[in-house]
Amino acid sequence: MENVFDYEDIQLIPAKCVVNSRSECDTTVTLGKHSFKLPVVPANMQTIIDETIAITLAEKGYFYVMHRFEPEKRIDFIHDMKSRGLFTSISVGVKKDEYEFVKQLSQENLMPDYITIDIAHGHSNAVIEMIQHIKQHLPQTFVIAGNVGTPEAVRELEHAGADATKVGIGPGKVCITKIKTGFGTGGWQLAALRWCAKAATKPIIADGGIRTHGDVAKSIRFGATFVMIGSLFAGHEESPGETTEKNGKLYKEYFGSASEYQKGEKKNVEGKKMFVEHKGYLQDTLNEMEQDLQSAISYAGGTDLEAIRHVDYVVVKNSIFNGDKIY
Ligand SMILES: NC(=O)C1=CN([C@@H]2O[C@H](COP(=O)(O)OP(=O)(O)OC[C@H]3O[C@@H](n4cnc5c(N)ncnc54)[C@H](OP(=O)(O)O)[C@@H]3O)[C@@H](O)[C@H]2O)C=CC1
Ligand SMILES: Nc1nc2c(ncn2[C@@H]2O[C@H](COP(=O)(O)O)[C@@H](O)[C@H]2O)c(=O)[nH]1
């Protein structure tokens, strides 16, 4: 691979502005049968999203992906969302019970609008077989499959029937995969995204490593349709998880889905826990993201997200850890 870079190594180059106000710039995006206000989705992690946040996001026109770590609640969740007239978006794994769960959804005529297959190493027969199983039993459901980090993986999952692929192995803030295994896209996530996007014929969701709102625009420039974000959405008033106080400041926990805190045991641990400063209300962050993205569209010289895809860029420096401390 040539030209390896990450978010902090890139600056997008402005083009002549065509709007009189940033409020004229449109950040909406379509995924499957629905359109959403922003090309951004909170990570399907237990300290990032819960049922209440999912309802709020769906009601307000944002995409969400419910996590899969309380599997017994998923049927009630789908019923609840449908009774409110809201779209349904859940996650599954690839173990045996998940095959039964998908069949149960089909038998009970509970077709979710979106299912995300949420696995660390998505370039695998386990994921390919789950895509095919979902498509067999829930043919109308939009399937997001991941996570992957190579064009071969994108092609194989698309070929198996995935409607979108999720790119990012190891760039996450609470990820230790890159340190414990030596593998992944940590430190070069943006270049990996570009590499994968060149092979993709369907939408790509860039997942992990977003540290600033400008990184959303950079992801779109390098081929993402959507961006999944954990750490920037952690620590809000509404965020699930423990709140603690230290020296008069409030912090909230954010832990990896492959951490011992999630798993309840120290087996194949590839995630850690951290405390992030309390950030206030989620809606304020979403509003700020929208304004920053509107501004990015104006710098791109356009009126919608498409304009960002065509801007020039420069590589300004090189870095390995994407600004993260290792532990
Ligand atoms: N995006 C990322 O960089 C990463 C994300 N995660 C997140 O952590 C959570 C747990 O992920 P995961 O462990 O996949 O889920 P599960 O614990 O549900 O494991 C899924 C299945 O895949 C197997 N498996 C897991 N990793 C591998 C591997 N490297 N090679 C072969 N088989 C494997 C597991 O078996 P067994 O456990 O026996 O190997 C199990 O049968 C997910 O939410 C995932 O998104 C985790 C790591 C990286
Ligand atoms: N290697 C691991 N990756 C993980 C784990 N839990 C979640 N994740 C991934 O991180 C992103 C969020 O990244 P962020 O930089 O925005 O915080 C999330 O969507 C997963 O793909 C984990 O335990 N290990």
Image: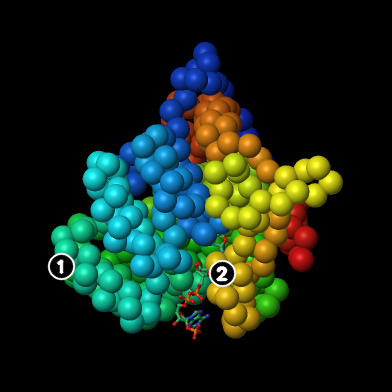
Q: Is residue 216 left or right of residue 100?
A: right
Q: Can you tell me which quadrant of the image ligand 2 is in?
A: bottom right
Q: Which dot marks residue 262?
A: 2
Which residue occupies 39% across, 34% down?
60
| Residue 282 vs residue 130, the one in the foreground | 282
Mark 2 CB near ligand 2 (8 Å cut):
yes
| Residue 98 vs residue 220, the one in the foreground | 98
Amino acid found under the numbered disc labelled 1: Gln
Q: Give the residue at x 38% y 76%.
A: 94
Q: Which residue reaches farthest right?
A: 247
Up the image or down, 131 lies above or below 280; here it is: below
Q: Is residue 235 above or below residue 75?
A: above
Q: The C terminus appears in which quarter of the rendering?
A: bottom right
Q: Position of residue 188 (x, y in %)?
A: 64, 61
Give the residue at x 21% y 70%: 104
Decide which of 319, 83 is in the foreground and name it: 83
| Residue 182 visible in the snapshot | yes
